[in-house]
Image (cartoon, grey):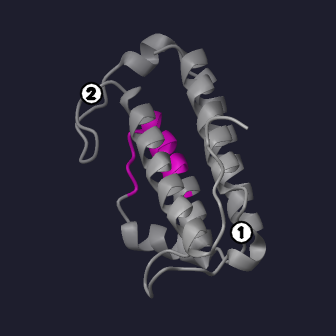
Amino acid sequence: MKPEEIQMQMKNLRDYFNRSTRPLQEEHSGFTPREGQFSVVGQVAHTAQTIEWFFDAAFSNQWDMDFEGLEKKTRACTSLAAAREWFNRAVDKAIQAAGAHTAEEWASPFPPNPIMGEIPRSSIIGAVVDHTAHHRGALTVYQRLLGLTPPMPYME
């Protein structure tokens, strides 16, 4: 996968996520369908954190397996504006990381690891896109539960 292709996928991912979650406002930050589930803010923060998590491990080969600690950081975010900023920073960092490596480097396999196995590093892109789409969909359901109409993510 070429760095430019990864960068384009990350730009599209951002556009789709931001467009489809646009109706959510700060007053919706704490909404959760059920106690214990991620709130609106938690969904956005977790999505941002996971983008960072994958891209941080892509070439460091260090997978942060402290899932309890990661969740605490996510749940510490209480502002939708802050979560959106985190998300946009995470995508910016991913775009930068994509361009910092050649297509050959992205095609090189991970060393043995507990998450992705020994597959090409570019495989994280599919995982990031799927994961982000999953949470985008959850936030669409949240919007409907709040009486909002989520926009189509792929175009205005």
Three-letter code for the amino acid on which mark 2 is drawn: Ile
Q: Secondary structure at mark 2?
A: loop
Q: Which dot, 2 or 1, sits closer to the camera? A: 1
Query: In the rendered image, which quarter contains the C terminus?
Result: top right
Residue 109, image x, y percentages: 30, 24
Q: Is residue 88 magenta?
A: no
Q: Is residue 51 left or right of residue 121?
A: right
Three-letter code for the amino acid on which mark 1 is drawn: Leu
Q: Residues within 10 Å of mark 1 (few under 14, many from 20)?
A: many
Which quarter of the picture shows residue 110?
top left
Query: In the rendered image, which quarter contains the N terminus?
Result: top left
Tag count in the figure?
2
Q: Which residue is mark 1?
A: 80
Residue 23, image x, y percentages: 72, 61
> Pointer 2 and pointer 1: residues touching (CB < 8 Å)?
no
Residue 28, image x, y percentages: 69, 76
Residue range (magenta): 49-64
Q: Secondary structure at mark 1?
A: helix
Q: Earlier in the sequence, mark 2 or mark 1?
A: 1
Is the stretch drawn in magenta largely helix, strand or loop?
helix
Q: Which residue is mark 2?
A: 119
At 53% from the left and 53% from the top, the residue drawn is 136
At 40% from the left and 34% from the top, the residue drawn is 126
Q: Is residue 155 left or right of residue 112?
A: right
Q: CA separation, marks 2 and 1? A: 35 Å
